Amino acid sequence: MGLLFQTTVIDCNDARRVGGFWAELLGMPLESDDDGTEHWIDFGPDGRDLLFLTVPDRKSGKNRLHIDLRPDDQAAEVERALALGARHVDIGQGQQTWVVLADPEGNEFCILRALKPDE
Amino acid sequence: MGLLFQTTVIDCNDARRVGGFWAELLGMPLESDDDGTEHWIDFGPDGRDLLFLTVPDRKSGKNRLHIDLRPDDQAAEVERALALGARHVDIGQGQQTWVVLADPEGNEFCILRALKPDE
């Protein structure tokens, strides 16, 4: 095909810290370049990896893009995320089936409900 | 595993329009729910899909997350993206191997260089 969806890139003030959080959360290794400025999680040859870049500007407002995660056990994974450094955030979502959290630099993400076996 | 990287979600003012652009760009079908409020591109059972949600708030500033695309022919894919409604944007990137574009609502994305056969 002409274009492969290669990567979702996250600007960070501390890419190693944020990348480390996401790697732990997803149970994947964090890879780094030689000078330690770029860190990524490689999901394999079909792309759609995660790349963490250090930038000087700070996060401002709610992110226009965010990541949704599918748990096998929502409550357990929310607790695990909080223990890794996530926090609950209120972006006006109200009562939903998903839980809105933010990573150590405030990037919003959602832990969806677990799917039933027949879904 | 405990958490699957399910989806990268893009907030849009017109989710059908933005989703339609990305579906054309990636050569994938755009799927929609019954009432037309959610649109998505499904990459299969291992997740990492794209979901387009209509929200009232406008994009503000440079996105903290963005998508990188890998072309087989960079110049041709940049031209194709422009014809579909993308535009060049300057986020201070200077001269790079990648080309920075924005989708019809200004969401930045990059078309990387093509990989050589032995890369």
Image (cartoon, coloured by chain):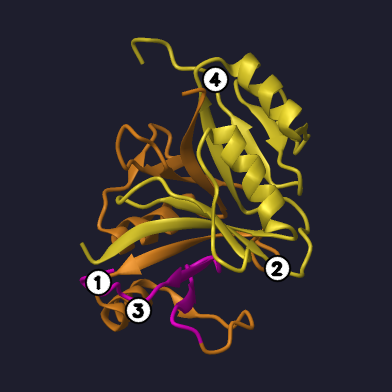
Chain colours: A yellow, B orange
Inter-mark Cα distance, 3 to 4: 38 Å
Left or right position of A43 against A20: left
Residue denoted by label 3 = B78
Dot 4: what SS? loop
- Which image quadrant for residue A74? top right
Q: Which residue of the protein is positioned furthest toward the bottom in this rendering?
A: B95
Secondary structure type for disc 2: loop
Secondary structure under tag 1 reads loop
Left or right placement of residue A82 versus residue A7 in this view: right
The Cα atoms of the two marked residues, 4 and 2, are separated by 33 Å
Residue A70's x, y, as percent? 50, 27
| Type of amino acid at the residue the image marks with label 3 | Val
Dot 2 crowding, Cα within 10 Å, few <14, some 14–19, many 20+ = some
Look at discs 4 and 2 and give the one toward the viewer.
2
Residue furthest front in the image: A34
Chain for disc number 4: A
Distance from label 1 to label 2 (Cα)? 28 Å
Please give the chain letter of the residue carrying mark 2: A
Which mark is in front, 2 or 3?
2
Taken as a whole, is the magenta stretch helix, strand or loop?
Answer: loop
SS for callout 3: helix
Residue B50 position (above or below residue B72): above
The answer, for residue B37, to whether it is visible in the render is: no
| Residue placed under numbered mark 2 in the picture | A55
Residue B108 colored in magenta in the image? yes
Residue A16 forms part of the magenta stretch: no
Which dot marks residue A83?
none
Q: Which stretch did the figure color magenta?
A: B96-119
Kindly identify which residue carries mark 4.
Answer: A113
Q: Label 1: few (<14), some or many (≥20) within 10 Å?
A: some
Left or right, A109 with reference to B50: right
Residue at image point 76% right, 44% down: A104
